[in-house]
Amino acid sequence: MATIRKHLRPVFVMFQDGISQVQIEVVLSSINMVLLNAGVNNLIRVTNFGVWRNSGYQKNGKLLPYQSVDWYIARGFQESRNNHQAYVREILVQLWNEPWQIETPHYDVVVLHSDIYDDNCNFVIGSAIKGFGMVISINRFEGLEHSIQIECIKTEVMHEVGHVFGLVPNTRTSNITESLGRHCTNQCVMRQGLAVPHAWIRYSKERLSSKQAFCSQCQQDLRNYFR
Ligand SMILES: [Zn+2]
Ligand SMILES: [Zn+2]
């Protein structure tokens, strides 16, 4: 009997203008890596919308709602408490409200190089909504040596995609911690890393040396999300 899968939807990825081709490739391959770990890489397609701009996305120099990645990010800046960080929650709210979600249900991923923040945080490197989507910023990793930066972006993308796919679920009772959401305490990309970038450099090095991104518990939880 074939396994019945749930939560199968494509992943739509958009990038803020100014993110390099290498960084784009890293984000896409990291999302695919999670799909592989979850056992759904042949069932979920990742679509790269790049710096997405619909035809006629602006009028008289004004960005039209839901017609470009620029507009979502501009909303984040309009609702921001300052002028140098985007308010990540506003971007997620607008992704939630977008008409495209009704047309084609999908997981949303938006990647910024601008710094982002959320309520009660000076900054965040990402924010995810379970079963819906995520916004990340590579800003805090950009000053790092290139290869370390790339590995940190991978770790961060896998972490947030993990949240989108339900990690760490309430059903799990061991090796968990509540720290700005439910996180894993095993050697795993689902650990919380409040010390940015240091914790993420360490997690990335451990991921490389163990050749395993998700611990066996998270890997199982990931597979269960689609069952
Ligand atoms: Zn997290
Ligand atoms: Zn884990």
Image: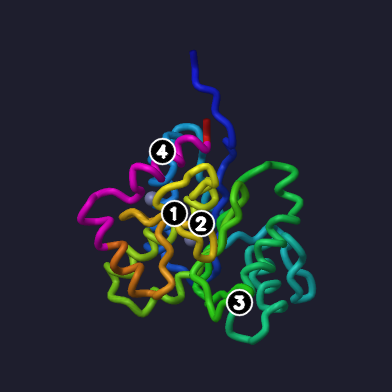
Q: Which residues are magenta?
A: 205-225
Q: Nearer the viewer, mark 3 or mark 1?
A: 1
In this rendering, would 68 be left or right of 186? right
Counting residues from the start of the chain, the first of labels 2 and 1 encountered is 1
Three-letter residue code for mark 3 = Asn
In this rendering, would 63 be left or right of 161? right
The structure residue drawn at horizontal position 44% and vertical position 42%, both measured from the top left corner, is 35
Residue 120: which numbered mark, if any? 3
Counting residues from the start of the chain, the first of labels 4 and 2 encountered is 2
Counting residues from the start of the chain, the first of labels 3 and 4 encountered is 3
- Pointer 2: what residue? 182
Three-letter residue code for mark 1 = Ile
Q: Residue furthest left?
A: 209
Report the coloring of the rendering.
rainbow
| Mark 3 vs mark 4, CA separation in Å | 32 Å
- Pointer 1: what residue? 176
